[in-house]
Amino acid sequence: MTPLSPSDKLAQRLALGIPALLLAGAYVGQYGFDLAPCQMCWWQRYPHFAAILIGLVSTVLPPRRAWIALAGLAIAVSGLIGVFHAGVEYRWWEGPGCAGTGDFTSLDFVRCDEPAWTLFGISLAGFNALLSLGGAIAIWVLLLARETRA
């Protein structure tokens, strides 16, 4: 197996670290601070789970750089879902049924259109969007950096 360049190794570390840290933060918020996730919060977690699995695959199976790029894509998908979710929270557009329409009789229902927590006016979905999209771009730039040097 061809060894990875330093920029590829960093991209691989980001492909594993970014989703792991964002999921860890989500679970700390959920269980440590009682911030129950809504349905759209869960939608943002699924691509991060996939990114971790794909990132792990990149450590053992060729073509490693392709797996790393695919993990970056999964991270970007979570970021795009975060953009959509943040837009629903800020009332820029309508969300799915979990955004306060319909008859909700369940006591554990969490609305998607009300942020559970904000910092400087940015919700958790907004932070996920920023960190995920920024991380995915960083991964792809690192992977491309190797190609331009060769």
Image: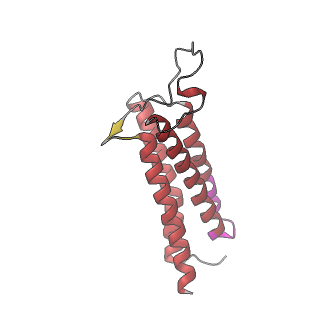
Q: Residue at x 48, y 40 (%)?
A: 87
Using the image, determine if residue 43 lies above or below residue 54: above
Using the image, determine if residue 135 lies above or below residue 3: above
Say left or right for 89 vs 45.
left
Question: Which of 58 and 84 lies nearest the eye of the viewer?
Answer: 84
- Occupied quadrant, residue 33: top left
Q: Is residue 59 visible?
A: no
Give coordinates of residue 51: x percent, y percent: 59, 53
Give coordinates of residue 14: x percent, y percent: 49, 61
- Occupied quadrant, residue 8: bottom right
Using the image, determine if residue 51 lies above or below residue 66: above
Q: Residue at x 57, y 75 (%)?
A: 4
Q: Residue at x 54, y 34 (%)?
A: 94
Say left or right for 115 vs 75.
left
In this view, the residue farthest toward the right is 62
Question: Residue 115 in magenta?
Answer: no
**Which residues are drawn in magenta?**
52-65
Question: Which of 137 and 7 lies nearest the eye of the viewer?
Answer: 137
Q: On the rendered image, what quadrant is the C terminus found in?
A: bottom right
Q: Is residue 30 visible?
A: yes
In this view, the residue farthest toward the left is 120
